Image (spheres, rainbow, N blue to C red):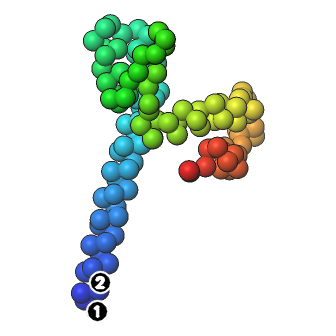
Amino acid sequence: MAQEKTRAEELLKDAHGRVDGWLHETEKYLTFAEKARSEFEKGDLTKRKEILYALGSNLQLLDKKFSVLLPPALERLQKAAPEARIVSRMFEPLNNEADTTDFGGLYSKNPILLRG
């Protein structure tokens, strides 16, 4: 019985570690997605290179058009962003507390914003 308890505790510790890692990665991608465009537009050549390298190694230039094969996490953010903007705009501006809505519930009803 004690061995089972120890094993269960180890599994929980491992799961918590993985969740913390996922949370860290998610925060990193969200911060990057939030700031990359303005930093690219305002940044010098070095900053622009850093942003492009952060996007990944699959960069392409075809017919004078630049394209990037995004990592899966950023690709999901790219697909979800327009839908999230639409849902958010439907409820702006929030004038007082009585106008607030359960955004989580609204976002969860949108199939594009659900986990894929």
Q: Which of 113 and 71 is in front in this view?
A: 71
Q: Is mark 2 on a helix, strand or loop?
A: helix
Q: Which of 18 and 93 is in front in this view?
A: 18
- At a point 62% along the width and 44% down the height, the residue shown is 113
- At a point 41% along the width and 21% down the height, the residue shown is 60
Q: Mark 1 points at which residue?
A: 1
Confirm whether residue 36 shows in the render.
no
Query: Badge 2: how crowded within 10 Å, few (<14), some, or many (20+)?
Result: few
- At a point 36% along the width and 10% down the height, the residue shown is 43
Query: In this rendering, is residue 70 above or below 72?
Result: above
Three-letter amino acid code of the residue under disc 1: Met
Residues at circles 2 and 1 in contact by the CB criterion of under 8 Å: yes
- At a point 31% along the width and 24% down the height, the residue shown is 53
The location of residue 59, given as percent across then percent down, is 38, 24
Q: What element carries label 1?
A: loop
The location of residue 56, given as percent across then percent down, is 35, 30
Query: In this rendering, is residue 98 above or below 66?
Result: below
Q: Mark 2 points at which residue?
A: 5
